[in-house]
Amino acid sequence: MTIYNRVIPVLLLMGNGIYKTVRFESPKYIGDPINAVKIFNEKEVDELILIDIIATSDSRKINYDLINNIASEAFMPICYGGGINRIDQINKLLKIGIEKVSINTQAINDISFIKDSAENFGSSTIVVSIDIRKNIFGKFMVYTNRGTKNTGLDPIEFAKDLENMGAGELLITSINQEGTLKGYEINILKKITEQVGIPVIANGGGGGLKDMNKVISEANVSAVSAGSMFVYYGKHKAVLINYPDRFSIENLI
C-alpha cells in the first residue's frame, strides 16, 4: 500500500454557504457546500475540513442539519470545527457521520477539555486548530476571535501542552498567509513538528503543489491543507472547485 501525504481542502462555512477569506478577513461567497462536496467526491479527495468561522465568535449553535447533509453526501472523512465547547456536541457530530472534530477557542479557554475529549472519543478523533500570527515584535503568537485577539500563548509550547493533553493532531493556520496563495510559514511549522510527535497539518498560504512539496520536505508536516487553491482558478480567481490528480499527490515528497 502506497503511503503519501494527505492533501486536504478546507471549506469555510458561514450560514448555509461556503466562503473564502484573506488573512481571516473579507469573506467572499463561493457557493453551496453540498455541490462542492459532490465535486470533491468525483475527484477522490483524501479528507475534508469544514470550519464554521462565525459559530464561536457569534455564539451560534452548531448547524447540525447542514453538517448532517454534507456528511451524508461525502465519500471522504470529514473533520468539523466551529462552536465546539461541550462533550455532548462532539458525540452528536460523530453520530451524524463526522470522523474528527477540530477544537480551537475552547482549547485556549480550558485546555483540560482536550483531555476530556480524548478520553471520551480517542485521540485520533481530536484535532486542535491553532491560529498563529506575528505580533508587533515579529514573534508568532496564538490568536483567537478570528485572528483579532492575542492570547499570549507561544504556539510551540501550546502545541506541546496539547499533545500532553491527548490531542491527536494539530491544524496550524498562519493568519498572515491565509488566502494569499503565497506559500506556508515553513520556519514556525518546522519548529512545531520538531517538538511534537503527533501529526501536524500545515494550513494558510498554499498556492500550488510546489508550496505543498516545500512545506512537506522542509517542515516535515504530515499533511497539507488549503482553501483558495481548491476553490479558485487562474490569476483572476474564477470560482472553480478543483483538486490535484492522484499521480501528482502521490508524487509529493
Image (tube, grey):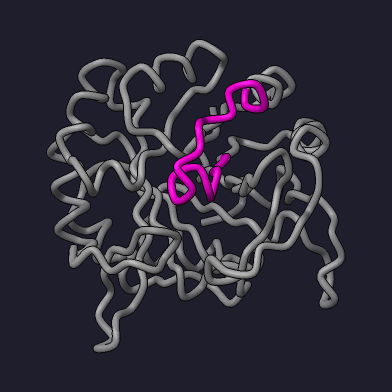
Q: Position of residue 244 (x, y in %)?
A: 73, 51
Which corner quadrant of the image does residue 183 belong to? bottom right
Name the residue located 32 percent from the left edge and 26 percent from the top edge: 86
Q: Is residue 62 left or right of residue 110?
A: right
Q: Main secondary structure of the magenta part?
A: loop
Quadrant position of the N terminus in the picture: top right
Asked whether, in this view, residue 53 is left or right of residue 171, the answer is right
State the image coordinates of residue 92 (x, y, percent, origin top left): 46, 15
Could you say where residue 46 lies in the image, as x and y percent from the top left? 61, 36
Residue range (magenta): 50-67
Q: Nearer the viewer, residue 219 or 78?
A: 78
Question: Can residue 9 be found in the magenta stretch?
Answer: no
Instruction: Looking at this view, name the residue that lies furthest to the front.
Output: 59
Q: Nearer the viewer, residue 247 or 9?
A: 9
Q: Nearer the viewer, residue 129 or 183?
A: 129
Compared with residue 245, is residue 74 higher up or lower down, i.e. above or below?
Answer: above
Q: In the figure, 123 relative to 39: above or below?
A: above
Q: Residue at x 14, y 58 (%)?
A: 157
Question: Measured along the vertical axis of the image, is residue 202 above or below residue 71?
Answer: below
Q: Residue at x 39, y 58 (%)?
A: 145
| Quarter location, residue 17 | top right
Q: Residue furthest top?
A: 95
Residue 6 screen position, x and y as percent: 53, 43
| Residue 202 position by quadrant | bottom left
